[in-house]
Amino acid sequence: MSCGVLHFRYNHVHILFTMGLSVSVSSAQMLDTQQGKAIFQKACIGCHYEGGNVLQPGATLTARDLERNGVATEENIFKITYYGKGRMPGFGEKCAPKGQCTFGPRLSDEDIHLLAEYVKSQADEGWPKLERT
């Protein structure tokens, strides 16, 4: 901290407070969050509305279930989204075997990274209500 400025990171968002109490959030971080949310709403919300799971109630996207199922990190969320597991299809461009992968559009690695970051942050925040876009 110097010159009356406090800078810290909260849930992957950089916040800058000055003596005048104005707030500046990193526009890149906000864009990543919005992109992750848009991808989630396009590819995931059908089964995982508000972090739930309509097909497998024990495999929700809550922090507790992610931890219990061994997918509590962004890296683990990326892997399961890319390759799929059980009833969840994989969305990665090079997902294999074919029967485990979505029949719909595939997601780029960057999109899956944004999605994993978004899911992790939502899980950490208790899946606050999503506004439909």
Image (cartoon, helix red, strand yellow):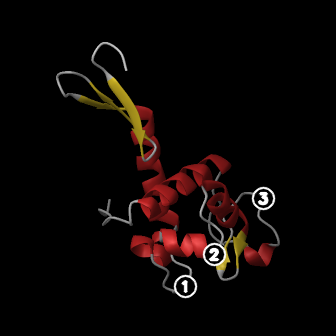
Measured as percent of width and height from the top left, residue 70 is found at: 66, 70
Q: Is residue 53 visible?
A: yes
Q: Is residue 26 visible?
A: no
Quarter of the image that includes the N terminus = top left
Could you tell me which residue is drawn at 33 percent across and 64 percent down?
128
Could you tell me which residue is drawn at 60 percent across and 50 percent down?
113
Residue type at the position of mark 3: Lys
Q: Quadrant of residue 23?
A: top left
Does the CB distance between marks 2 and 1 fall below 8 Å?
yes
Mark number displayed over residue 94: 3
Residue furthest to the front:
1
User: Could you classify mark 2 by the number of other residues whose Cα lies within 10 Å: few (under 14), some (14-19), or many (20 or more)?
Assistant: few
In the rendered image, the vertical position of residue 47 relative to residue 124, given as above or below: below
Query: Label 2: which residue?
Result: 69
Mark number displayed over residue 58: 1
Q: Is residue 33 left or right of residue 94?
A: left
Measured as percent of width and height from the top left, residue 64 is found at: 51, 73
Q: Is residue 78 left or right of residue 58?
A: right
Q: Secondary structure at mark 3?
A: loop
Q: Quadrant of residue 103?
A: bottom right
Q: Earlier in the sequence, mark 2 or mark 1?
A: 1
Residue type at the position of mark 1: Gly
Q: Earlier in the sequence, mark 2 or mark 3?
A: 2
Measured as percent of width and height from the top left, residue 65 is found at: 54, 75
